[in-house]
Amino acid sequence: QLQLVESGGGLVQPGGSLRLSCAASAFTFNYYAIAWFRQAPGKEREGVSCIMSSGGSTTYADSVKGRFTISRDNAKNTVYLQMNSLKPEDTAVYYCAAPKDKYFCSRVANQFASWGQGTQVTVSS
């Protein structure tokens, strides 16, 4: 399993931007699809975005499409989530995750085996 560490969360005003990073410590990282999830208090974990190992294919939840961009730098073993035009409803703990089938990109939580510890994103004025 991959070891994943998120960073980049914080407090931002509505309309602002943040970039989250997910760093992995494994030479096999380049073979894995990676996804971002988020979980707000009292809500189920939601799949936000996923990127294939090559970076050539991405998916987004409708709630973030056009505002969030997922990307990866395989030379740095890192996946990014650029979040623009943030809204209060984006407030959540954000997690990155690697799937059980490393080649399979999904936004369904039970298909993922490795998770980071999460980073808090708060959008508030």
Image (spheres, rainbow, N blue to C red):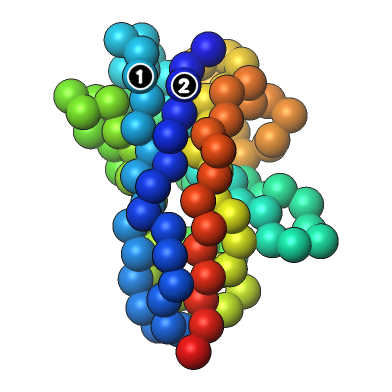
Q: Residue 57 carries which label?
A: none
Residue at coordinates 23% horizontally, 33% vertically from top-left? 73
Residue at the right extreme? 42
The kind of secondary structure element at disc 2 is loop
Judging depth in this view, the residue of 9 and 46 nearest the camera is 9
Residue at coordinates 37% horizontally, 25% vertically from top-left? 24
Q: Quadrant of residue 39?
A: bottom right
Mark 2 is surrounded, within 10 Å at the Cα level, by few (under 14), some (14 to 19) or many (20 or more) other residues, namely some
101 in relation to 94, above or below: above
The kind of secondary structure element at disc 1 is loop
Residue 63 pos. (x, y %): 58, 65
Residue position for label 1: 25
Residue position for label 2: 3
Q: How many labels does the image show?
A: 2
Left or right: 102 as drawn, with respect to 7: right
Residue 120 pos. (x, y %): 53, 58
Question: What amino acid type is highlighted by mark number 2?
Answer: Gln
Judging depth in this view, the residue of 12 and 66 nearest the camera is 12
Residue 21 pos. (x, y %): 35, 45
Mark 1 is surrounded, within 10 Å at the Cα level, by few (under 14), some (14 to 19) or many (20 or more) other residues, namely some
Residue at coordinates 81% horizontally, 61% vertically from top-left? 42
Residue 115, can we see it? yes
Question: What amino acid type is highlighted by mark number 1?
Answer: Ser
Judging depth in this view, the residue of 63 and 84 nearest the camera is 84
Whether label 2 touches label 1, CB < 8 Å? yes
Residue 57, can we see it? no
Left or right: 89 as drawn, with respect to 29: right
Residue at coordinates 53% horizontally, 70% vertically from top-left? 122
Task: Tell me how far mark 2 sits from mark 1, CA to CA.
Answer: 6 Å
14 in relation to 68, above or below: below
Q: Quadrant of residue 88?
A: bottom right
114 in relation to 84, above or below: above
